[in-house]
């Protein structure tokens, strides 16, 4: 929410024959409308959205250079060449490294892995990793979740006589004329390459590798069941890297969440248990906000190899030990994030309140939490936000954006300021000399074309639906639309002018409010609002009418099931 709490409530108005969709797929017109609001059109798309299976995934051979990459790997495996995986320290990179290591090992490759350390090495493959590999007799380097922007480093590897294969999903760099400028690798698998016929470019690095393992297993006659048994790691990578839950991503995550309950990774199972979760009931939320941050914490504060060791661990006591260590690291990360966010928001409000693009320098902040802090500030101020920290010999930064600001393209406009940079429309990372920080801030703001309305968060409402229309059957039917997340947001409904008949603050931290609500037609229903309870009561004062954006739910208590709403946004009426 913005500083003044202003939000714009927007109602979807997309058209379709909702009754026909309802009849054809035996769903309510409300659910049909939600599906259309997610830009799902046509019978085949709707069927895939509601009932898609792994058979609906795209052919991995469609990825440009996939067959070439697998043929090179097969040749290297058969001659016993040493292969080294170079991964990344975030959850996508960890899962991608796990998948590739397991896949190559299953095909009897001489394979090991290296994951850069965030502080010492920075993002992606670097010169020291390459020279070390050369000195240790490595014949082939294969990257995952990085490498597409590493032209100089890959050129060095080629000069040292190594074969280099790149698997990545980040934007392909371009030269001064806007032409694609990929690194000089022997083969590159990346759906964002030009002339790549793969139908969906929105997959993460872990899924690119998962597809590669699929083709590798075909080549070696490994049963397809073994490939499917690793599906949960493609799902975890997709959710953890905040990919849009659309098209095949949605199928991968939905099926992958079910696969987790049968996972063969002892370490993953122990981490879920240590987090106090039931492995058979995990949702995308649990991956994104509980499991994922624990796996990420090792790469942020120590080494991501710790998380990878957990996933590969075969010994129960050791798996429990590592899982508990990751949880402890995540708690440390949370504390550091809270402190950094507080200071970043102070700067945003006191020093850069007029800036369209926030560039906040926190020299003493641990660089590993810069991206999280940038995300928190972006949420609070609804502005593109970069958080910079002092690293070894330079400044490092992470950015998080808003829909109206293509972060990677805007950074290309000042690329001569960077030592290294890369990213997506919504997120980016970079390093630069400290002397360029102020120029970076000034030039980004000078070239930005953002308008005032771009800074007002939009709350999208699927259906303006009176509480009288709610039923337990509808709540159950909405589960067909799961998993929810980026690109497949949880449905939101709205009703105006509800009477507040009663309020009660709940929880040890008084961070929830139960409201007794009454419609104009006299229907009573409870609503749950998760916010600072005492602050809400103060804001409420003597007002007794409220407009709400909500999601319907079932409250189970003492064996009794009752309908309730969870309030996502509200506006008090005078």
Image (cartoon, rainbow, N blue to C red):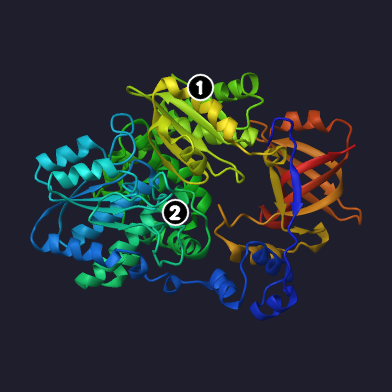
Which residue is found at the position 66% from the left and 26% from the top? Answer: 354
Residue drawn where x is 73% and y is 68% of the image: 15
410 sits to left or right of 168 = right
Relative to residue 439, is residue 80 depicted above or below?
Answer: below
Q: Residues within 10 Å of mark 1 (few under 14, many from 20)?
A: few
Please name whichever residue, 324 or 223, is drawn nearer the observer in this view of the structure: 223
- Distance (Cα) linking label 1 and label 2: 35 Å
Front residue (pair 202, 194): 194
Position in image of residue 290 (x %, y %)? 47, 43
On the image, the x and y values in percent for residue 302 come to 32, 32
Question: Image point 35% across, 52% down: which residue?
Answer: 168
List the residue tagged with mark 2.
238
Residue 554 position by quadrant: bottom right
- Count the numbered circles shown: 2
Give the quadrant of the C terminus.
top right
**Which element type, helix, strand or loop, lies under badge 1?**
helix
Residue 457 lies, in percent from the top left, at 69, 42
Give x and y (percent) for residue 254: 49, 62
What mark, if any, has residue 178 been given in the picture?
A: none
Split into 4 quadrants, where in the image is the N terminus?
Answer: top right
Look at the numbered discs 1 and 2 and tell me whether their residues touch, using CB distance below 8 Å: no
Q: Earlier in the sequence, mark 1 or mark 2?
A: 2
* Whether residue 261 can be seen here: no
The image quadrant of residue 31 is bottom right
In the image, is 129 to the left or to the right of 501? left
Residue 391 in the image: above or below residue 297: above
Task: Look at the image and tell me whether residue 256 can be seen.
Answer: yes
Mark 2 residue crowding within 10 angstroms, few (<14) / some (14–19) / many (20+):
many
The residue tagged 1 is 438
């Amino acid at each position: 929410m913005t500083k003044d709490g202003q939000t714009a409530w927007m109602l979807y108005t997309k058209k379709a024959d909702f009754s026909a969709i309802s009849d054809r797929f035996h769903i309510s017109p409300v659910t049909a409308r939600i599906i259309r609001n997610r830009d799902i059109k046509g019978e085949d798309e709707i069927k895939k959205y509601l009932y898609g299976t792994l058979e609906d995934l795209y052919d991995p051979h469609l990825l440009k250079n996939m067959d070439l990459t697998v043929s090179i790997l097969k040749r290297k495996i058969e001659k016993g060449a040493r292969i080294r995986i170079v991964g990344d320290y975030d959850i996508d990179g960890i899962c991608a490294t796990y998948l590739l290591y397991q896949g190559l090992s299953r095909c009897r490759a001489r394979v090991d892995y290296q994951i850069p350390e965030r502080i010492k090495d920075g993002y992606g493959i670097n010169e020291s990793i390459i020279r070390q590999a050369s000195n240790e007799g490595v014949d082939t380097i294969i990257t995952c979740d990085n490498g597409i922007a590493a032209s100089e480093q890959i050129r060095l590897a080629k000069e040292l006589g190594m074969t280099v294969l790149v698997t990545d999903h980040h934007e392909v760099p371009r030269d001064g004329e806007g032409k694609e400028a990929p690194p000089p690798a022997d083969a590159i698998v990346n759906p964002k390459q030009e002339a790549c016929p793969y139908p969906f470019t929105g997959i993460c690095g872990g899924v690119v590798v998962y597809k590669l393992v699929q083709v590798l297993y075909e080549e070696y006659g490994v049963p397809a069941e073994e490939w499917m048994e690793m599906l949960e790691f493609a799902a975890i990578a997709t959710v953890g890297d905040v990919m849009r839950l659309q098209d095949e991503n949605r199928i991968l995550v939905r099926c992958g969440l079910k696969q987790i309950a049968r996972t063969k990774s002892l370490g993953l199972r122990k981490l879920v248990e240590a987090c106090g979760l039931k492995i058979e009931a995990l949702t995308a939320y649990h991956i994104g906000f509980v499991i994922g941050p624990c796996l990420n914490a090792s790469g942020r504060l120590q080494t991501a190899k710790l998380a990878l060791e957990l996933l590969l661990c075969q010994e129960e006591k050791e798996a429990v030990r590592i899982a508990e260590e990751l949880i402890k690291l995540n708690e440390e990360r949370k504390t550091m994030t809270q402190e950094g966010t507080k200071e970043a928001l102070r700067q945003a409000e006191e020093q850069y309140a007029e800036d369209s693009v926030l560039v906040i320098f926190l020299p003493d902040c641990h660089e590993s939490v810069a991206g999280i802090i940038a995300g928190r500030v972006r949420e609070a101020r609804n502005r593109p936000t970069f958080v910079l920290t002092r690293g070894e010999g330079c400044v490092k930064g992470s950015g998080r954006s808003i829909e109206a600001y293509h972060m990677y393209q805007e950074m290309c406009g000042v690329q001569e300021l960077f030592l290294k940079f890369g990213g997506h429309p919504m997120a980016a990372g970079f390093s630069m000399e400290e002397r360029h920080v102020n120029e970076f801030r000034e030039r980004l703001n000078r070239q930005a074309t953002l308008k005032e309305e771009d800074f007002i968060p939009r709350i999208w409402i699927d259906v303006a639906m009176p509480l009288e229309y709610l039923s337990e059957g509808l709540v159950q039917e909405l589960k067909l639309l799961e998993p929810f997340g980026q690109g497949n947001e949880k449905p939101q409904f709205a009703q105006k002018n509800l009477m507040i008949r009663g309020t009660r603050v709940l929880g040890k931290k008084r961070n929830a409010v139960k409201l007794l609500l009454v419609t104009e037609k006299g229907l009573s229903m409870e609503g749950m609002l998760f916010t600072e309870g005492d602050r809400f009561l103060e804001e409420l004062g003597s007002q007794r009418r409220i407009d709400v954006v909500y999601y319907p739910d079932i409250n189970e208590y003492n064996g009794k099931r009752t309908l309730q709403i969870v309030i996502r946004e509200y506006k008090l009426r005078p």
